[in-house]
Amino acid sequence: MDSIDQKILELLQQDVTLPVSDIAERVNLSTTPCWKRIKRLEQSGIIKARVALLDGSKIGAGVSVFVHIKTRQHEENWLTRFAESVNRFEEVMECYRMAGEWDYLLRVATRDIESFDRFYKKLISEVDGLTDVTSSFAMEEIKFSTRLPLTHC
């Protein structure tokens, strides 16, 4: 990946709806070579998807909850079942296997506390082997970004 690819990625992270001609102009390329670079970035998996970012508060999913999970189950079979279960919950926006005190961290988007409570009850009933589940409600979103830093490329 060269500096032109990095510039293209930065522009796409800011606004994926930019026409290729605009991107090409901003990175000093003609349209076809720019389009080919974007296609190569997609085919190599660097660009995973082109999506619209929604305002959760305007669509009934404005409450962010961070769920810390501990388990004594660390067998591969259990990990696979856990991942499959978590992936079925549309409220789970992100799920990470962690090092340290907690085994997993989920970011959950929900309408309100009652909606989260329904999610929580369903989670603990569907996923066996959880020893501790602790939730923290975000009071205010100070920074949210989907832009990855490109300075390390």
Image (cartoon, grey):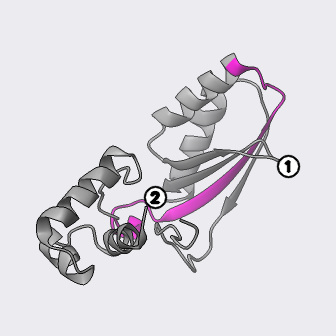
Where is residue 61, by image quadrant?
bottom left
Which numbered tag is attached to residue 150?
none
Quarter of the picture holding the N terminus: bottom left
Residue appearing at x 31%, y 69% in the figure: 12
Q: Position of residue 36 (x, y in %)?
A: 21, 57
Residue at 32% in and 70% down = 8
Q: Is residue 55 magenta?
A: yes
The three-letter code of the residue at mark 2 reads Arg
- Above or below, 109 against 153 in this view is above
Nearer the observer, 128 or 45: 45
Residue at (29, 51) in percent of width and height: 40
- Tag in front: 2 or 1: 1
Q: Is residue 57 above or below residue 98?
A: below
Nearer-the-camera pick, 104 or 67: 104
- Relative placement, left or right, of 143 versus 71 is left
Which residue is situated farthest in the top direction here?
A: 77
Q: Are marks 2 and 1 in contact (CB under 8 Å)?
A: no
Residue toward you, 86 or 22? 22
Q: Position of residue 134 (x, y in %)?
A: 75, 50
Q: Which residue is mark 1?
A: 100
Q: Which residues are magenta?
A: 54-76
Would you name the residue on which mark 2 appears? 111
Please, what is the three-letter code of the amino acid marked with disc 1? Gly
The answer to which quarter of the image holds residue 151 is bottom right
User: In this view of the protein, can residue 83 be seen by the observer?
Assistant: yes
Q: Is residue 55 visible?
A: no
Left or right: 107 in relation to 109:
right
Q: Picture coordinates of residue 33 (x, y %)?
A: 18, 63
Q: Position of residue 3 (x, y in %)?
A: 41, 73
Horizontally, residue 85 falls left or right of residue 59, namely right
> How far apart are the alpha carbons under marks 2 and 1?
30 Å
Residue located 13% across and 74% down the image: 21
